[in-house]
Image: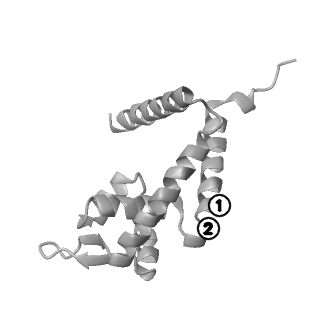
Amino acid sequence: MNNSFDFAQAPGHLVRRAHQIAVALFMSELSAEDVTPVQFAILNAVMDTPGVDQVTLANRVAFDAATSGSVIGRLETKGWIRREPDQVDRRRKLLWLTPAGQDATLQMKRTVEQVQEKITSPLTPEEAQALRVLLAKLVAGHERASTD
């Protein structure tokens, strides 16, 4: 009789479980701000590149452009993002943080940094660094493969 697949040790399963843990920690620590990891990634990216267009932003945070539009809409409703049409190409929407969005992002940044430390807290500092390196290599390798 064949043994079953060792699902508990499968990389895909472990990545999914690690993602669940990371999101749960994020949501727990930032529950008062009522923000998701994707919303924070968008706010952080807009803070880094004021006036970025929605399509470029979606690529930067590795999120599909259609869905990112609705996420941006929710951030706009909160008063954290300002969206304006490009003067040259009115179809392009350019994004800026509002002063309230800038303040909220900077305040959340400290908590997000603490969440990142909690995610890797079961590891030694060396193991945490190795995990970051390996995850970055895994992501980069698959991103290159998808564009070939």
Q: Which residue is mark 1?
A: 28
Residue 125 coordinates in the image, percent (x, y): 54, 31
Residue extending furthest toward the left: 88
Q: Is residue 48 left or right of residue 113?
A: left
Comparing 11 with 20, the one in front is 20
Residue extending furthest toward the right: 1
SS for tag 1? Answer: helix
Comparing 25 with 90, the one in front is 25
Q: Which residue is mark 2?
A: 31
Query: Looking at the image, do the residues carrying marks 2 and 1 touch, with CB atoms under 8 Å apart?
Result: yes
Q: Is residue 55 left or right of residue 38?
A: left
Q: Is residue 37 above or below residue 31?
A: above
Comparing 131 with 113, the one in front is 113
SS for tag 2? Answer: helix
Q: Amino acid at mark 2?
A: Ser
Spatial distance from mark 2 to mark 1, Cα to Cα? Answer: 5 Å
Residue sitting at x 33%, y 77%: 99
Which numbered marker is on residue 42?
A: none
Q: Is residue 39 above or below residue 100?
A: above
Residue sitting at x 28%, y 71%: 96
Residue sitting at x 50%, y 27%: 130
Residue 76 coordinates in the image, percent (x, y): 40, 78
Residue sitting at x 39%, y 54%: 61
Residue 30 coordinates in the image, percent (x, y): 58, 64
Q: Tell me if mark 1 has few (under 14), some (14-19) or many (20+) residues whose alpha carbon lies within 10 angstroms of its own.
A: few
Residue 52 coordinates in the image, percent (x, y): 25, 63
The colour scheme used to paint the residues is one colour
Q: Quadrant of residue 34?
A: bottom right
